[in-house]
């Protein structure tokens, strides 16, 4: 980085470039045509894959095939956090469903 340039000017330039990115129209690949069930299904598959990876890493450490205990613990914690977040999304969806069902018509 050039030390002669004011850091505020650099920050302003970064903010302007971010604003330009935000002002660009959404490309057709990112259109929101997917429904809630496919998004939820994708999240379930991702969490399942993380849990399987964590299980495989832990088994490899247990069997002596790997000495990466820290990596195995990190993947297990990542899978645990993903699962907890998925449970929270499920709870919010069920709560929203109950609220809609209890609305007077």
Image (cartoon, grey):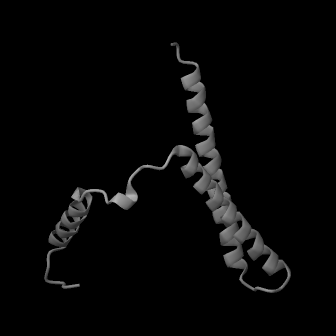
Q: Residue at x 22, y 60 (%)?
A: 19
14 versus 85 height, above or below = below
Whether residue 20 sits left or right of residue 93 in the image: it is left
Q: Residue at x 67, y 62 (%)?
A: 79
Observer able to see residue 81? no
User: Which residue of the protein is positioned furthest toward the top in this rendering?
Assistant: 105
The image quarter containing residue 21 is bottom left
Q: Residue at x 71, y 64 (%)?
A: 51
Q: Toward the viewer: 10 or 44?
A: 44
Q: Toward the viewer: 49 or 37?
A: 37
101 versus 88 height, above or below = above
Question: In the rendering, at what x and y percent does residue 38 appear?
Answer: 56, 50
Whether residue 61 sits left or right of residue 47 in the image: it is right
Whether residue 63 sits left or right of residue 14 in the image: it is right
69 versus 32 height, above or below = below
Q: Toward the viewer: 82 or 38?
A: 38
Quadrant for the N terminus in the image: bottom left
Q: Toward the viewer: 48 or 38?
A: 38
Number of callouts in the render?
A: 0
50 versus 99 height, above or below = below
Question: In the rendering, at what x and y percent does residue 102 appear?
Answer: 58, 19
Question: In the rendering, at what x and y percent does residue 103 appear?
Answer: 53, 18
Observer able to see residue 82? yes
Whether residue 76 sits left or right of residue 18 in the image: it is right
């Amino acid at each position: 980085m050039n030390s002669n340039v004011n850091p505020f000017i650099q920050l302003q330039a970064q903010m302007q470039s971010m604003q330009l990115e935000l002002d660009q129209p959404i490309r057709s690949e990112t259109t929101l045509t997917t429904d809630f069930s496919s998004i939820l299904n994708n999240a379930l598959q991702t969490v399942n894959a993380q849990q399987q990876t964590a299980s495989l890493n832990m088994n490899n450490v247990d069997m002596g095939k790997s000495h990466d205990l820290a990596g195995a613990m990190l993947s297990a914690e990542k899978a645990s956090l993903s699962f907890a977040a998925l449970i929270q999304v499920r709870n919010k969806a069920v709560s929203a469903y109950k609220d809609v069902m209890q609305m007077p018509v």
